[in-house]
Image (spheres, rainbow, N blue to C red):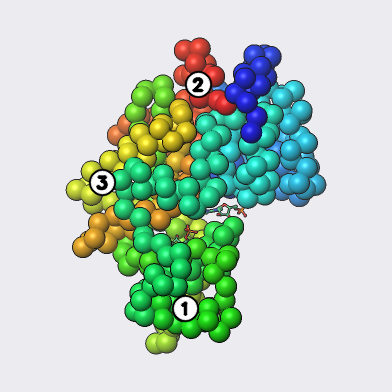
């Protein structure tokens, strides 16, 4: 990973600050928010997507760096530096470039790069969540662990957005493994948690020294529509691939859990990878009224569910007296850090 000293060196040569990201995922929100905070913006964009970003004048980057393939991105850092860019990482950047190359990029990045390393690996994520005292679904590492009637959720390493996941009883899975129909090498086995999903979007602010709850969503996955009309469930509906998001507000008496989970995750991150998580993150949770909240994943950067709230949400209005999306919140933190001479604390 590139060192903080090298990044500081680059930052010192900057004459101004522009906010940059890859044109995908939550880029419209990031550019829109940066412009609201008075920054110019730089979009790294596939040639055939420029028209998409030109269609939204208030969220269109001021400068485009175009490329024919995401593979070339690591080579574009020089252009990004010439434009005095700070890059905002999101899931598409990581998915298309690969976390190791992202960590090496010689370009100032908002947040702590180490948090991307911790979120890139499910075992590390669970270590982080468990050390924070959050409840996580039981995981299974061998066939001996599981009983006939256990409800398992099978995930694939490196799967994108829930693709190919399936549910199965412990006994059936054992028989499939023994018959050589599936190998446990490439899978991550979790207990299936029945309940309601909540994806709170947090922001850890170094400037205000607090963890903010900015908004909350729930993902839309094919399985969610499986009630539509057929008495029997068809197999094609057993699909957890995310294709959209809907806003969700939680019962106010449950907020105490949401807020405390966010704070604990931040406190633990400071011990695991100093100075811990900086800026936006999201916990993927399932609430079971009898068993409480389970967290099955952490995203240590802006999540696409925040795209629902370009003008802020039913939570951000109780923190800021102006429309505050997560994209804008990032730019706001950068602006305050600049004003206080603390940019190097929020950009690595
Ligand atoms: P994409 O650039 O659309 O292929 O997205 C890259 C990754 O970001 C996907 O593999 C997903 O894990 C995640 N992602 C994209 N869009 C969403 C969304 N609307 N909600 C949740 N995750 C998303
Ligand atoms: P993930 O790739 O971990 O974000 O999971 C994709 C989707 O699978 C989630 O959005 C949930 O709908 C579902 N899911 C993941 N883990 C569990 C679990 N342990 N129990 C029940 N549903 C889950």
Of residues 261 and 302, which is closer to you in this image?
Answer: 261
Quarter of the picture containing the N terminus is: top right
Query: Which numbered disc covers residue 345?
Result: 2
Callout 2: 10 Å neighbours few (<14), some, many (20+)?
some
Instruction: Give the Cα distance between marks 3 and 1.
Output: 34 Å
Please, is residue 67 above or below residue 155 in the view?
A: above
Per the image, label 2 sits on a secondary structure element best described as helix
Give whichever of discs 3 and 1 has the lower sequence position. 1
Q: How crowded is mark 1: few (under 14 residues within 10 Å), some or many (20 or more)?
A: many
* Pointer 3 residue: 257
Question: Element type at marker 3?
Answer: helix
Vertical relation: 290 (above or below) 102: below
Q: Earlier in the sequence, mark 2 or mark 3?
A: 3
**Which residue is pictured at 55% across the width and 41% down the height?**
117
- Horizontally, is 76 left or right of 151 in the view? right
Q: Name which of mark 1 and mark 2 comes first in the sequence.
A: 1
Residue at disc 2, CB closer than 8 Å to ligand 1: no
Crowd rating for badge 3 (residues with CA inside 10 Å; few <14, some 14–19, many 20+): few
Name the outermost residue toward the front: 144
Which residue is pictured at 41% across the width and 21% down the height? Answer: 207
Report whether residue 7 is seen.
yes
Q: Where is residue 12 in the image (x, y as percent from the top left)?
A: 64, 14
In this view, the mark in front (1 or 2): 1
x and y percentages locating residue 296 in the rendered image: 40, 55
Residue shown at the point (51%, 43%) measured from the top left: 118
Q: Residue at x 54, y 19 (%)?
A: 344
Q: Evaluate whether residue 247 shows in this view.
A: no
What residue did someone put label 1 on? 173
Extreme residue toward the bottom, this view: 231
As measured in the structure, the alpha-carbon distance from the residue carrying label 1 to the one carrying label 2 is 48 Å
Residue 83 falls left or right of residue 190: right
Residues under labels 2 and 3: Cα distance? 29 Å
């Amino acid at each position: 990973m590139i060192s903080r000293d090298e990044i500081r060196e680059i930052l010192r040569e900057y004459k101004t600050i522009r906010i940059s990201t890859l044109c995908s995922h939550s880029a419209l929100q990031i550019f829109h928010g940066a412009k609201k905070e008075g920054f110019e913006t730089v979009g790294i964009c596939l040639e055939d997507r420029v028209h998409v970003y030109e269609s939204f004048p208030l969220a269109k980057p001021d400068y485009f760096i175009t490329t024919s393939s995401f593979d070339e991105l690591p080579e574009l850092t020089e252009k990004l530096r010439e434009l005095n860019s700070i890059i905002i990482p999101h899931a598409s950047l990581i998915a298309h470039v690969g976390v190791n190359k992202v960590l090496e990029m010689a370009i100032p990045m908002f947040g702590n790069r180490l948090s991307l390393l911790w979120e890139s690996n499910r075992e590390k994520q669970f270590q982080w969540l468990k050390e924070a005292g959050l409840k996580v679904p039981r995981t299974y590492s061998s066939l001996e662990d599981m009983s006939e009637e256990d409800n398992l959720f099978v995930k694939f390493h490196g799967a994108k957005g829930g693709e190919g996941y399936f549910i199965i009883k412990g006994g059936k899975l054992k028989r499939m493994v023994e018959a050589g129909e599936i190998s446990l090498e490439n899978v991550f086995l979790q207990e299936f948690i029945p309940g309601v999903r909540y994806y709170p979007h947090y922001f850890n602010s170094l400037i205000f020294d607090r963890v903010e709850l900015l908004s909350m969503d729930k993902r839309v996955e094919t399985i969610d529509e499986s009630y539509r009309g057929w008495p029997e469930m068809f197999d094609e509906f057993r699909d957890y691939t995310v294709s959209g998001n809907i806003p969700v507000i939680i019962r106010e008496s449950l907020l105490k859990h949401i807020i405390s989970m966010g704070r604990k995750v931040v406190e633990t991150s400071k011990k695991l990878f100093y100075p811990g998580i900086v800026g936006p993150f999201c916990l993927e949770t399932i609430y079971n009224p009898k068993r409480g909240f389970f967290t099955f994943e952490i995203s240590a950067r802006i999540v696409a569910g925040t795209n629902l709230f370009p003008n802020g949400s039913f939570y951000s209005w109780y923190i800021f007296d102006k429309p505050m999306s997560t994209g804008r919140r990032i730019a706001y933190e950068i602006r305050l850090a600049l004003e206080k001479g603390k940019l190097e604390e929020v950009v690595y």
